[in-house]
Image: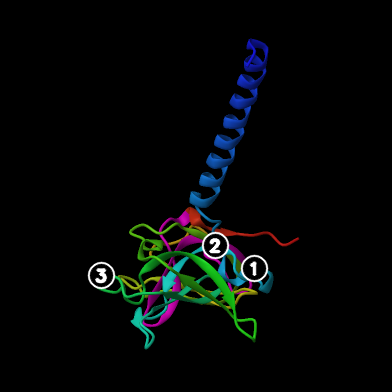
Amino acid sequence: MSRHSKAIRRPQTILFITVVLGLFFASFYISHREPPLVRIGEIKPGMNFSKVRVQGVLESNARRMGDGSVLYMIVDETGALPVFLNHVPEGKLPTAGCAISATGQLGMDANKLASMRVHGSAQIKVLKKPDPITVSGRISKLWTPPPDSRAPHRIILDRPEGSLEVVHWFTPKRQPAVGDRVKAKGVLGFYKGRMQLKVREAADIRLQSER
């Protein structure tokens, strides 16, 4: 083989290796990157078989099913989603009220109701510090605790996704009224079977002006 032929083949070989390595790393990145976080109420039939991540709280204790899987009923501020882990994980199963993140594949039944299938226990995580969320709605009910009480203030917000109880333990500078539209930032939780948004700072409840 002439030196000229070798000189031509060398850059072609380098180019081929570069392309193969580029495709390998692109495939590796796509397969290992974290799937998008979606709100449960925004899951649509067109997302069937999609791999996504949801975050919320357990509506009830995680429980073993007859087929050997484990059911986690996860709810967020927009809806509820049954999540099935294909096997029973080691250790104690989480209980109602725990903040949970789950990554898996969506599925739709004949009635277009969504569920999620998770293949590895590492894809279901109990969150020590769940991310705060922000909700908006119109106040339908207010309850103020009596003086010297440790009970929280309670606000019931009416929203398109359904009513939600907002609780806080501070005296607001401006007391909201029934009919006001507000935006509240806090952490979802459960108390005596009711889903609540727990707000810690006065600045995290804001009145919204009408347009």
Q: Nearer the viewer, residue 25 or 89?
A: 25
| Tags 1 and 2 touching, CB below 8 Å | yes
- Give the CA separation, mark 1 to mark 3: 31 Å
- Residue found at x 64% / y 86%: 110
Residue 39 shown left or right of residue 103 in the figure? right
Q: Quadrant of residue 16?
A: top right
Q: Which residues are magenta?
A: 175-202
The residue identified by callout 1 is 47
Q: Which residue is mark 3?
A: 90
Mark 2 surroundings within 10 Å by alpha-carbon count, few (fewer than 14), some (14 through 19), many (20 or more): some
Q: Is residue 98 above or below residue 7?
A: below
Q: Position of residue 30 (x, y in %)?
A: 55, 49
Which mark is drawn over residue 52?
A: 2
Query: Magenta segment: does it hold 176?
Result: yes
SS under mark 3: loop
Q: What quarter of the picture does the N terminus occupy?
A: top right
Separation of residues labelled 3 and 2 (CA atoms)? 24 Å
Q: At which x and y percent is residue 83?
A: 46, 75
Q: Position of residue 178 (x, y in %)?
A: 59, 74
> Quick one: label 3 or label 2, which is nearer the N terminus?
2
> Label 3: few (<14), some or many (≥20) within 10 Å?
few
